Structures are given as structure tokens and as C-alpha cells.
Image: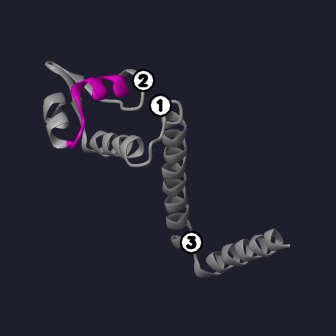
Amino acid sequence: MISEADTVNRIQDLTTRSLRLWVKLGWVFPSLGPHGYVFEEIDIARIELIRQLKRDFAVSNDMVPIVLSLLDQIHGLRHELSSLARAVEAQHQDIQQDIIAMLNDNLDCNKE
């Protein structure tokens, strides 16, 4: 767990005020430790993403939650697809081939 002060020191151009605002707005979800907020590595990655969105891409405060929500959905879908791929890999080769054939049929239908 990383303290609020260490988080601010770790991320370039991040201020305590901005970090607390992002927490208040629900963009970051730290835990509450005995001495204030504490952050995990996933929180640090999200904070760096928010900083990049705001600084490098000039994303407005109104748009940040939309972008974060879309990225969270993409992350969730990638996890689900990975789980599905593992489930397919665990099947007998005949079943795998049937699944691939069905997927190819669906892709062909979508092209038309």
C-alpha cells in the first residue's frame, strides 16, 4: 500500500489537491488507512492515466468519467474474453473446431 504523500511524490505533476479531488469525484478508489488514503498499484496506474488524459490529451473534467468508464468496460471485456479463450482451450479438439467454425460463420454474416 502506498500513502497519499508517496503517491503524490511518485507521480509527476500530481498535487495532493488534485488527488483528493479525483478521489472525491469517484475517479480513484483508495482504501482508508490509519493515516489517510492508501493506494495500490492499480490505483497508481489509474491516477497516471487520469493525469495523462488531463495533461496530454486535454480531456475535460466532464469527459474523464466517460473515458474511464469506457476503459473499465474494455478491461472487463478483455478479462471475459481471456476466460472464454481458456474455457475453449480446455475443450476437446472437436468442440474447439465447432466453436471456431461458428465464430467464422458469424464473422462472415457480419461482413454482408
Q: Is residue 101 visible?
A: yes
- Residue name at image x 23 percent, y 30 percent: 15
On screen, residue 34 above or below 76 = above
Find disc 1 in the rendering and name its residue.
61
- Label 3: state its secondary structure: loop
Residue 40 rendering spot, x and y as whole percentages: 25, 39
Q: Amino acid at mark 1?
A: Asn
Q: Amino acid at mark 3?
A: Gln
- Calculate the distance from the C-alpha at mark 1 to the C-alpha at mark 2: 10 Å
- Label 2: state its secondary structure: loop
Magenta span contains residue 21: yes
Binning the other alpha carbons within 10 Å of mark 3 as few (below 14), some (14 to 19) or many (20 upward) gives few
Residue 11 rendering spot, x and y as whole percentages: 21, 42
- Calculate the distance from the C-alpha at mark 1 to the C-alpha at mark 3: 46 Å
Disc marking residue 25: 2
**Circles 2, 3 touching at the beta carbon (< 8 Å):** no
**Circles 1, 2 touching at the beta carbon (< 8 Å):** yes
> Magenta stretch: dominant SS?
helix
- Calculate the distance from the C-alpha at mark 2 to the C-alpha at mark 3: 44 Å
Find disc 3 in the rendering and name its residue.
91
